[in-house]
Image (cartoon, rainbow, N blue to C red):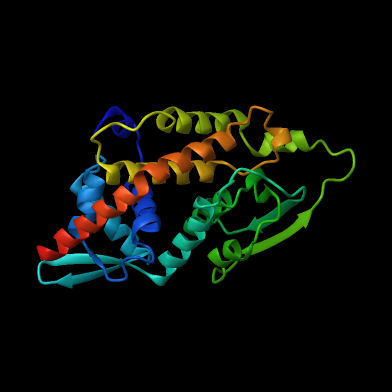
Amino acid sequence: MTDQATELRFKPQELLLALGGALILDTYEDPLPTRVFLDVLGSVGVSADATRSVLTRLTERGLLTRHQDGRVASYGLTETSRRVLREGRRRVRTPDPFHQASSDWTLLSFSLPESQRDVRSRLRSRLTWAGFGCLRDGLWIAPGRVDLDSIIAVGADVGGLSIDGFVAAPAAGTDVARFVRRAWDLDALRWEHEEFLRRWDRPLPRGEDPLALFTLLGAHWIRLLRSDPVLPERHLGEDSPGRRSAAVYGTVVTALEARAQAAFADLVRDARARR
């Protein structure tokens, strides 16, 4: 891989989720041979052992199904993972993902026993994806009106979990900028956008594997979406890079998507023929 690809560092799970949402969901209903995942992730520097490990981990979490046909193992999406990927894809494909049209704010409070650390971690991850920042322990805030159903569903069957959410508008005299700075690191947010632009706002390398680049682009875009809470522009400054990031992403997707789809289809066909 060239510097443009190898300098990006993502967890195997990030790459698999990007691959699943962009190229597998709604296209491949049947499980795919392990070789497909080994080849795609191998092309972006992930070892075979790391790929097999994350496939096993996602299967244990109910996000993948595992099938054995002789010596060949295959993995497919579950209903849970399809729901998660469709939810994520709606945001991935939003044409203006960093524009906040609402003047409202969503507040959410939750309490959870310390013994439920795994649920706490999943809940915090879902809150971050939904644009929430932490004001203080157990009290989170997000710009706009957030649909809380999927967040509440994370701990629906967990004993001792209490979640309360409501939409509010700041009272007169409230220093909104102060709690924005308290809940989010605005310098870090700008850095995430600048890093995305530095890596993708330039000509694509000639002769590079379009499937590898498309997978890396998808993982990087999802990471950027996760880091950006979509704050009102008045809190970001006139030179906020969000719209430029969205434009660059759209340009690179247009350049890569069709070629990546074709390359992935060839890979799947070859892997199935070798079984």
- Tell me how many marks there are: 0
Q: In the image shown, does 66 or 239 lie closer to the viewer?
A: 239
Q: Is residue 190 above or below residue 75?
A: above
- Residue drawn at x 63%, y 37% is 184
**Residue 3: % across, % down:** 29, 28
Task: Please state, as top left, top right, bottom left or bottom right, where the C terminus lies in the image.
Answer: bottom left
Specify whether residue 182 is in view. yes
Task: Please state, as top left, top right, bottom left or bottom right, where the N terminus lies in the image.
Answer: top left
**Residue 174: % across, % down:** 84, 39
Q: In the image shown, does 180 or 234 lie closer to the viewer?
A: 234
- 25 with respect to 197 (left or right): left
- 113 with respect to 253 (left or right): right
**Residue 252: % across, % down:** 41, 40
Say which quarter of the image contains residue 52. bottom left
**Residue 47: % across, % down:** 21, 44
Specify the farthest residue to the right.
172
Specify whether residue 115 is in view. no
- Residue drawn at x 54%, y 56% is 123
- 57 with respect to 224 (left or right): left
